[in-house]
Image (cartoon, coloured by chain):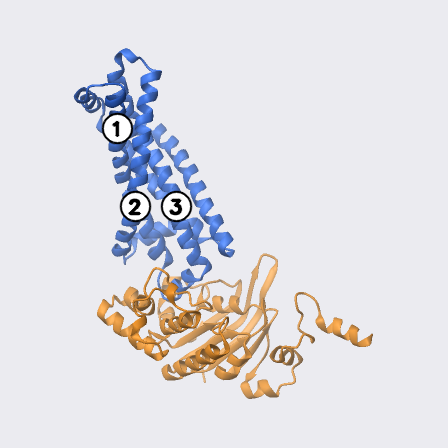
Chain colours: A blue, B orange
Amino acid sequence: MFVGQTLASMLRPPIYFRIIGQQIIRIGYFSLPVVALTSFFTGGALAIQIYYGGNQFNSEAIVSSIVALGITRELGPVLGGLMVAGRVSAAIAAEIGTMRVTEQIDALTTLSTDPHKYLVAPRVIAATLCMPVLALVADIIGVFGGFVVGTQSFGFNAAIYVQNTIDFLTFDDVSSGLIKAAVFGFIIAMMGCYNGYYSKGGAQGVGRATTNAVVSASILILAANYLMTSLLFSS
Amino acid sequence: MTAKIALSDIHKSFGPKDVLRGVNLEVETGQSLVVIGGSGSGKSVMLKSILGLLTPESGSIKIDEQETLGVARRQRAHIDNQIGMLFQNGALFDSLPVWKNVAFRAIQNNGMGEADARDLAVDALKRVELGPELLDLSPASLSGGMHKRVGLARAIASEPEIIFFDEPTTGLDPIMTDVINHLIRDCARELGATTMTITHDMTSVRAIADKTALLYKGEIIWQGTTEQLEASDDPFLNQFINGLPYGPIEVEGQRIEAASSQMGAE
């Protein structure tokens, strides 16, 4: 019902473009460092695992291709999604939850403003738009992390590593990750808004809403990832 | 006189707890009604029911003779547009400066530009005796009294026909209480608005009420003018307005009357 109300409010004018813009900055731009660092170290660690776990004689091709595949299909969007869930879901739940317990949401209603349209829809739109961009950044930096480890620690040739990565990756590898990321963005904002919107019981209630937002968003991301991977790759 | 607001047989419960048990109340156009009652008597639930923030199980709530119960939010927009509300803690939006809070309705609903919205905020703040130096401040930097006054400025900025006040003086010192009471009375008179205030502060009752209603256990058990209030020998009313610990009003589930009678007998 909450999702339905939010989707309906997105379709009805007015659309608060200014608030959507502000949320894009808060959700997307300010999440860049955490997503970039996460994906860089994940790409590096993945390269080490593949190098030592795989066939070291042909490792130059294997490391670059598996890092690229792993990052773009799974680790970029999923780890990026989980990091953004921790940061953004919690922040949204805390903000909207505080607004709930201090009657600011009731005040919005009495001022003839639909809280779904004013508070929820802009955050959901912004997160859904931002997550694919963040996932793309995670893809690039994650692959770069593997490249740094491969060339600096294992002595791979930089040009060959890059060429192998380009040769191996397909458009579908990247696009499937971006589709997943958009869904994760929707989940992240929706869980933050839902838990904040229905929080009650003062500061303790807001704390509970924040925790529930992060936990539910994380679980739903992992479950949605499994479902989408099944759908996207089994066909 | 026609009733601007009319409540008829309103029932509202939360789980097994019946909070409103058949509230009947009318506020005439231009009248200042104050609803008094102890904590947990159902005052806030009644107010939120009128505002459409809660939905009673049964009864009728009419504003300007139009039924509001069961009406979708968007379909009662024309009613909401003539209502102003001062919340207990102001409920100012933390993320917006004072001027955007005060002119919120005009900006969001009427697309008012920044210059006009700031002018509107200056005028509304002037009515509550605040200066334009507050315009760009964050609500977090305001004192409790200022918070209330900015909340009042927001409530009256659109010159509503009906204004609701939820515990307007709670948490304020006696001087600020007097200031807020006078501002409420003056603003309502200036706008010719119908007002409903819920409070348990008798100073507010005497300062702003044309008519007072006592809510007890989810029912209006007494109502009358301020003169009738002072002259009444209703035992519930007398206990409440005099703040007596004994009488027919149950406190925290215990009948203090019974306890005091027992003590007297001993």
> Could you say where residue A165 lies in the image, as x and y percent from the top left?
22, 23
**Of discs 2 and 3, which sits in the foreground?**
2
> Could you say where residue A184 lies in the image, as x and y percent from the top left?
35, 39
Q: Secondary structure at mark 2?
A: helix
Q: Residues within 10 Å of mark 1 (few under 14, many from 20)?
A: many
* Image mark for residue A89: 3
> Could you say where residue B265 lies in the image, as x and y percent from the top left?
82, 76
Residue pictured at 53% horizontal, 72% vertical: B8
- A51 relative to A170, above or below: above
Protein chain holding label 2: A
Instruction: Tell me the quadrant of the picture where the C terminus of chain B can be found.
Output: bottom right
Q: In which quadrant of the rendered view does residue B52 lie?
A: bottom left
Q: Mark 3 or mark 2, which is nearer the start of the sequence?
A: 2
Q: Which residue type carries mark 3?
A: Ser
Q: Mark 2 or mark 1, which is nearer the start of the sequence?
A: 2
* Image mark for residue A143: 1
> Could you say where residue B139 lies in the image, as x and y percent from the top left?
37, 65
Q: Mark 3 or mark 1, which is nearer the start of the sequence?
A: 3
Residues beneath discs 2 and 3 located on the same chain:
yes
Q: Residues within 10 Å of mark 2 (few under 14, many from 20)?
A: some
Give the CA separation, mark 1 to mark 2.
21 Å
Q: Residues within 10 Å of mark 3 (few under 14, many from 20)?
A: many
The reply to whether residue B177 is visible in this rendering is: yes
Q: Which residue type carries mark 2?
A: Phe
Give the CA separation, mark 2 to mark 3.
13 Å
Protein chain holding label 1: A
Give the CA separation, mark 1 to mark 3.
27 Å
Q: In which quadrant of the rendered view does residue B254 lie?
A: bottom right
Q: Which residue type carries mark 1?
A: Val
The front one of A218 and B62 is A218
